[in-house]
């Protein structure tokens, strides 16, 4: 009996299926146990991650409650108890709570007149590379303000010049100390323009801007006129709308 093309096709399909089945059986015999182990390990790892994530969320929630309680205690005037509560947070796994606790301890130390303890807290924040940069920048500014009278002017400039950037969040606080350091170094050509820039920056606190205008004027920089021109220009622009 002649073999038709359809019979050949069916035969080749059966052979192919048999080969595939044989390959699958051989593969499972050789690697089956390893695959089971890998799957089990993967499930264990995933389960462990879910548990860790749940525990981390619970801890964060508890830390948040502890921090809120510490703020309430501090506002109530009980500094000693607030300091104890902050001690429980200074080694928290969450960087934000750790930074907040150290800032609270520094504030309590300052209120108690213990500048050395406050400086130590600020220094610890600055040195903690796991903290977000804004916390470290704030601590550096506060540390430098407390140490300002004991530092060489160049030390102040080296510390704060990177933060004394026009338009930056720390321009007022850092810029004022840098400008005063320049004056101590007898560099009015650097101090004057910096005071003038602070006087014109709307993001700088009003108290610092007022002092900056006065200092710029003393150094021969007409910051007052420039500031008034900006106000006039803003008013004219709003009138054209």
Image (spheres, rainbow, N blue to C red):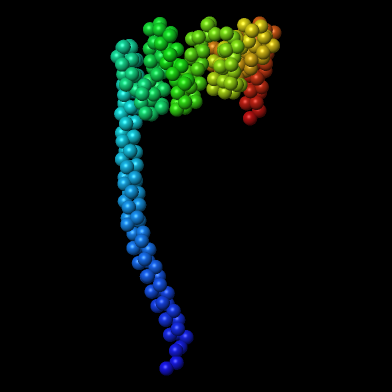
Q: Residue furthest front?
A: 30
The vertical placement of 24 against 160, above or below, is below
The vertical placement of 61 against 45, above or below, is above
Residue at 34% over, 42% down: 49
Q: Is residue 208 left or right of residue 21?
A: right
Residue 225: x and y in percent read 68, 13
Which residue is nearer to you in this view: 182 or 168? 182
Residue 96: x and y in percent read 41, 26
Which residue is nearer to you in this view: 236 or 161? 161
- Image-quadrant location for residue 158: top right
Residue 182: x and y in percent read 63, 10
Q: Is residue 7 left or right of residue 55?
A: right
Residue 162: x and y in percent read 58, 21
Q: Quadrant of the C terminus?
A: top right
Q: Is residue 176 at least partly visible in the picture?
A: no
- Image-quadrant location for residue 154: top right
Q: Is residue 48 left or right of residue 172?
A: left
Q: Is residue 65 at least partly visible in the picture?
A: yes
Q: Quadrant of the N terminus?
A: bottom left
The vertical placement of 146 against 26, above or below, is above
Residue at 44% over, 18% down: 124
The vertical placement of 88 against 10, above or below, is above
């Amino acid at each position: 009996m002649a073999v038709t093309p359809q019979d050949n096709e069916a035969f080749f399909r059966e052979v192919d299926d048999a080969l595939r089945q044989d390959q699958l059986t051989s593969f499972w015999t050789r690697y089956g146990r390893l695959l089971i182990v890998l799957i089990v390990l993967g499930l264990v790892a995933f389960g462990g991650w879910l548990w860790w994530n749940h525990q981390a969320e619970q801890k964060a929630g508890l830390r948040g409650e502890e921090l809120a309680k510490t703020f309430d205690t501090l506002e109530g005037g009980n500094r000693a108890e607030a300091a104890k509560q902050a001690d429980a947070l200074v080694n928290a796994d969450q960087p934000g709570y750790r930074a907040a606790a150290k800032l609270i301890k520094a504030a309590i130390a300052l209120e108690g007149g213990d500048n050395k303890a406050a400086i130590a807290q600020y220094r610890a924040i600055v040195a903690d590379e796991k903290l977000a940069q804004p916390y470290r920048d704030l601590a550096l500014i506060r540390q430098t303000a407390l140490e300002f009278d004991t530092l060489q002017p160049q030390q102040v400039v080296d510390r704060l010049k990177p933060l004394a950037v026009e338009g930056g969040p720390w321009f007022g606080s850092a810029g004022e100390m840098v400008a005063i350091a320049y004056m101590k170094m007898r560099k009015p050509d650097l101090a004057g323009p910096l005071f003038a820039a602070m006087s014109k920056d709307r993001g700088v606190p009003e108290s610092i801007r007022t002092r900056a205008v006065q200092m710029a004027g003393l150094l021969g920089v007409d910051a007052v006129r420039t500031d008034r021109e900006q106000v006039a220009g803003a008013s004219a622009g709003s009138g054209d709308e």
